[in-house]
Amino acid sequence: MARFWTWVGVAVAGALSLSLAGCSSTGGKRAEDARAAAAAQGRAAVDTPRWTFAMITHAGDGDTFWDIVQNGAEQAAVKDNVRFLYSHDDEAQQQAQLVDAAIDKKVDGIIVTLAKPDAMRAVLARAREAGIPVVTVNSGSAESREFGALAHIGQDETIAGEAVGEELDERGRKKALCVLHEQGNVGHEQRCDGVAKTFDGTLVRLHVNGTSMPDVQSAIEARLQSDPDVDAVVTLGAPYADTAVKAREGAGSDAEIDTFDLNAKVAAGLKDGSLGFAVDQQPYLQGYEAVDLLWLYRYNADVLGGGRPVLTGPQIITGADAAALEAYTKRGTR
Amino acid sequence: MSTTTPDVSDERFLRASPPLRRLLSRPELGSIVGAIAVFCCFALAADGFLRASSLGTVLYASSTIGIMAVPVALLMIGGEFDLSAGVLVTSSALLSSMFSYQMTANVWVGVGVSLLVTLAVGAFNGIMLARTRLPSFIITLGTFLMLTGINLGFTKLVSGTVSTRTIADMEGFDSARALFASTLTVGGVPVKITVVWWLALVALGSWILLRTRAGNWILAVGGNERAARAVGVPVARTRTGLYMGVALGAWICGQHLLFSYDVVQSGEGVGNELVYIIAAVIGGCLITGGHGSAVGSAVGALLFGMTSKGIVFAEWNPDWFKFFLGGMLLLATLLNTWVRRRAEAVK
């Protein structure tokens, strides 16, 4: 036992001395802190009561996209003097139970995603009975109104897909690969359907296992090697764009890589030309607006959208726009 | 494999011992202590945790795990694993819904067909185990992967999308919903019917384990297979029965999923098999078999439900939930082992 603790001591001391010896003058935590300090200082801008809003999403564990949504929601919560609670589960039943828990807590507003709308029908009826206003975000534009939500903030996946198809046509692409990284996700299917609708060339669907990056890379690589006609690869999530770039190198192909959604890596890729374009749905805006809409409803009974979804995308982003966005992606707001 | 002592959790064996020692040798003791501690912790830390509707939510969350934890615990007492339990729930719901829809049959027909097919999958696991002599870990891993693929592939083949069509407007739906997914109000607490199913299954499981010949067979098979075979216990039949028990639980859970949401997502259920195993282990089941109880699995499920929802009520960061869960699993197992050793030492 004593020997064990000796080893622990040695390991801790080693880690400390290494980090002291090798400072980096670029990037890292220090740069991040400087950026955070330069960003808006969090203070409430209103003196309304301290309401509590709960957001419940269908995100899995550790999803960068949802971090950005959360950042937006938290920023709006600070401004609007709101207590913001976040929880998530990728199983429909669990997500419904989390909404139940929020209703039990008697929160003042609920923000929910309707990726699996039918599972949410009953709990949202319960929220209505309890008199809690609901705003839906990101997915479920078709059901939002029917379930009695005040408004829906998000991107119509089919429209976003169509925008990608048109952009591919403009770039003169002939054969594109649509990489689905989550089997069974209806929104992803809609994106590929949208691309297929407006794209004049051929669209091939490729299912990959999104939970394992090496798997994704080898699958795309194999496809590019076996089908040299493919001149565009469309990934459905920002983290997969970089993987597709690596796969392209491995396969020695010259296909253009395009992607849905943004992150710091994608912005850098657009800037250096390794990526063609990205189609953004502004997740920050989805979180921010959802909190703000609930606040407006509580404060002034205002409702936005006139019963129709309020769209946050699609926005096509190319290398020309990327430079301006790079700083924002680094701080986790785009 | 522990093959030394006769099982101490058998009621009749303990009738002669003093009450305290009898209490100490109960497999669920450690988990009950843990459950009380976790309950008190959240009652203090979480605002609104003790509200009637909150307790209803916690009980519901526990019941959806607990219904499966009972047969999974019995299976583990019998010394085997079932990794296909999680997706089997989804398969059962999908089949029920698609059969009714495609055949335009009364919903109850789909429910019946689903029961038969789900039980057949359970029987397949048991028979394969007996015939191949492969470890159940491998066999059910294969079943798990095949079912995951069938769920997605078959659903897409039949309905063209990754989720089923709604059957809410079909005959028999309302009566089936009443049985599988209604809410009762008991003393001001909204109680989902799954809680009733859960308690009934716990009672049934306990009765089988402690009061019937089949229960003795389960303990014997899990404790020492060769000895059990030598004294004439039908090992293969017992295990097949246990797997069919798990299938029955999966069918109940699956029908609940279907009738509460009336549309089933085909990709779900993966990973839940471990949740059921965790609930059984926290409740005092030995991973090597021969020891454990149905009541313990219920306490394990309750611990799980309390933690997963308590974190939300307490407004802690849910990212840490799995960390707590892992810690709880280790602590509960250590406590169970310690208590059991003490109980065996004083015998």
Image: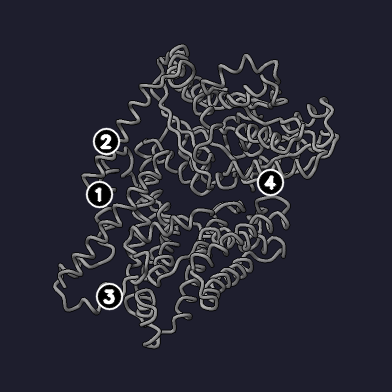
Q: Are labels 1 and 3 on one chain?
A: yes
The residue identified by callout 1 is B37
In this image, B128 relative to B342: left or right? right
Crowdedness near tag 4: few (<14), some (14–19) or many (≥20) residues, C-alpha within 10 Å: some
Amino acid type, callout 4: His
Q: Secondary structure at mark 2?
A: helix
**A66 and B184: which one is in front?**
A66
Q: Secondary structure at mark 1?
A: helix
Amino acid type, callout 2: Gly
The residue identified by callout 2 is A9
Residue B292 makes an appearance in the image? yes
Residue A135 position (above or below residue A28): below
| Residue shown at the point (69%, 23%) measured from the top left | A315
Q: Are labels 3 and 4 on one chain?
A: no
Crowdedness near tag 3: few (<14), some (14–19) or many (≥20) residues, C-alpha within 10 Å: few
Q: CA distance from mark 1 to mark 3?
A: 33 Å
| Residue shown at the point (72%, 58%) measured from the top left | B158
Q: Nearer the viewer, mark 2 or mark 3?
A: 2
> Farthest top residue?
A38
The residue identified by callout 3 is B4
Q: Are labels 2 and 3 on one chain?
A: no
Q: Quadrant of the C terminus of chain A?
A: top right
Q: CA distance from mark 4 to mark 1?
A: 46 Å
Callout 1: residue from which chain? B
Amino acid type, callout 1: Ala
Q: Nearer the viewer, mark 3 or mark 4?
A: 3
Residue B179 makes an appearance in the image? no
The residue identified by callout 4 is A207
Residue A164 position (above or below residue B28): above
Q: Nearer the viewer, mark 1 or mark 3?
A: 3
